[in-house]
Image: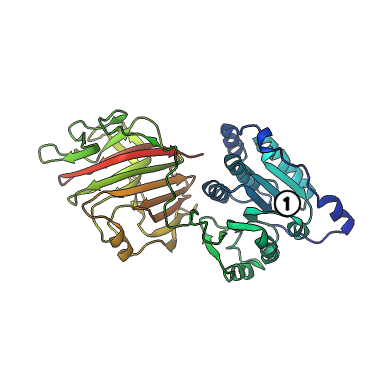
């Protein structure tokens, strides 16, 4: 956050023009994702000069990529942390980031950072007073991020709104700060016809997300699942358990589905898992269908660890995040909640919750996504149900039959999981069966 005061007219005339145009799309070199990730890793914890936290940078990236925004405006560059996330997103959509900064020293440092990461060709950096520059820009824009002087947020919005495309998105930072002008802006934007506004509270700062018109129903904050990407990878062939490893007494393929079953004669010795050996889960989108009986429960492990040492009851012990699988319709013991298998937090996020585990190790529930009646109507008892799990950075989202039912941000030190294996569970205890089919995954940046 920074204050952008009026400047002498002559100075403004010198610097209200473009400072370093981007290359044309055809001339841009391909972005090296590994180089960008290494850049963020190298600078983690150093973005102190009026920059956004990493979680908010990831949020901006996700909004741009998922909605395929190309014409991006950033009001307030600072030294380029959010600019880098937006530029990385623009490299995926073929877009350009126009970013405005008043302070010449910060702008120079931002350009140096963008050069180091390899993202400079995707940024049009302009030096000058944003109060005037925003008015002069012709647009159109489909994504705007405002992070300059807070008391001017409403004015920025009014100046940009006519240039914002239908379905475009206006975001603003530090909404939870309570600074002068913040509440005025939030109150104003919520009165604008056709604008749909939500507040993402997954960070301490808070980000408002406002869409123009109904064309932006594919937002991260929509309760409807996005259309399936074309490049999902199928990881179960429907015929045998190639690339899967589990107790051969209990796991098989039946009618094109993975079938796990325990009986009195073939009981599970402790919770046991079928482990995908073809890769790992880090940032990903997973889609599949499941069904099971009500005698017991199952689960989908992700970002988890195969435990091979210690006094174990079987060879397929797994610990980590679990998407609960059940054949029940009454909250809270239903399919979809996050259980920390083998961990300290147990049911760490329930169905219906939008929640954050903070750096203090405590959980805060920020909103409700579905109630008891809504879930009862959504779940297909004794039938196949569709699951989408999206894990991106610290954010974990679970969808059931096309509806967002859980949104958890895990920032708990030492407890949050960033990567690990994928596996399916057979629970110890009462005899049971569970099935999974159409299992496919897409790795995300």
- Farthest residue to the top: give it: 242
Give percent across and percent down for residue 320. 36, 42
Q: Is residue 101 left or right of residue 42?
A: right
Query: What residue appears at the point 60 percent right and 63 percent down from the top-left corner?
Result: 177
The quadrant where residue 250 appears: top left
Query: What residue appears at the point 70 percent right and 61 percent down from the top-left corner?
Result: 149
Give percent across and percent down for residue 109. 73, 42
Q: Is residue 243 left or right of residue 214?
A: left
The quadrant where residue 167 appears: bottom right
Query: What residue appears at the point 51 percent right and 39 percent down from the top-left corner?
Result: 445
Q: Which residue is mark 1?
A: 100
Above or below, 118 relative to 50: above
Q: How many numbered discs, if any?
A: 1
Local secondary structure at mark 1: strand
Q: Is residue 315 left or right of residue 112?
A: left
The quadrant where residue 110 appears: top right
Given residues 261 and 410, the one toward you in this image is 261
Q: How is the image coloured?
A: rainbow
**Does any portion of residue 342 appear in the rendered image?**
no
């Amino acid at each position: 956050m920074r204050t952008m005061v009026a400047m002498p007219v002559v100075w403004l005339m010198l610097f209200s023009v473009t400072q370093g145009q981007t290359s044309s799309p055809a001339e841009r070199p391909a972005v090296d994702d590994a180089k960008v990730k290494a850049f963020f890793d190298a600078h983690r914890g150093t973005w102190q000069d009026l920059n956004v936290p990493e979680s908010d940078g990831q949020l901006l990236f996700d909004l741009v990529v998922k909605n395929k925004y190309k014409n991006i405006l950033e009001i307030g560059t600072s030294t380029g942390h959010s600019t880098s996330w937006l530029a990385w997103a623009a490299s995926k959509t073929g877009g350009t980031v126009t970013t405005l900064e008043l302070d010449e020293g910060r702008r120079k440092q931002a350009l140096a950072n963008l050069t180091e990461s390899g993202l400079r060709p995707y940024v049009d950096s302009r030096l000058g007073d944003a109060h005037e520059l925003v008015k002069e820009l012709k647009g159109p824009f489909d994504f705007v991020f405002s992070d300059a002087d807070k008391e001017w947020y409403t004015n920025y919005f009014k100046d940009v709104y006519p240039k914002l495309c239908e379905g475009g998105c206006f975001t603003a930072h530090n909404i939870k700060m309570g600074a002068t002008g913040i509440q005025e802006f939030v109150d104003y934007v919520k009165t604008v016809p056709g604008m749909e506004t939500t507040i993402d509270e997954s960070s301490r700062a808070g980000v408002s997300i406002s869409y123009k018109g109904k064309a932006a129903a594919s937002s991260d904050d929509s309760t409807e699942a996005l259309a399936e990407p074309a490049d999902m990878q199928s990881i179960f062939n429907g015929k045998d358990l190639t690339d899967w490893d589990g107790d051969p007494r209990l796991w098989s393929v039946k009618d094109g589905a993975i079938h796990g079953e325990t009986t009195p004669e073939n009981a599970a010795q402790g919770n046991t898992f079928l482990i995908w050996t073809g890769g790992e889960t880090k940032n990903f989108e997973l889609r599949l269908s499941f069904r099971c009986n009500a005698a017991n429960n199952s689960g989908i492990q992700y970002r988890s660890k195969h435990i091979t040492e210690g006094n174990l009851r079987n060879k397929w012990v797994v610990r980590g995040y679990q998407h609960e699988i059940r054949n029940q319709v009454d909250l809270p013991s239903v399919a979809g909640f996050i259980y920390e298998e083998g961990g300290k937090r147990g049911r760490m996020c329930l169905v219906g919750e939008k929640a954050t585990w903070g750096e203090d190790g405590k959980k805060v529930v920020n909103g409700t996504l579905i109630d008891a009646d809504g879930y009862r109507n959504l779940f297909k008892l004794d039938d196949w149900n569709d699951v989408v799990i999206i894990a991106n950075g610290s954010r974990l989202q679970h969808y059931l039959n096309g509806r967002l039912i859980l949104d958890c941000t895990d920032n708990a030190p030492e407890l949050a999981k960033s990567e690990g294996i994928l596996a399916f569970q057979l629970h110890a205890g009462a005899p049971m069966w569970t099935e999974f089919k159409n299992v496919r995954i897409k790795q995300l940046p």
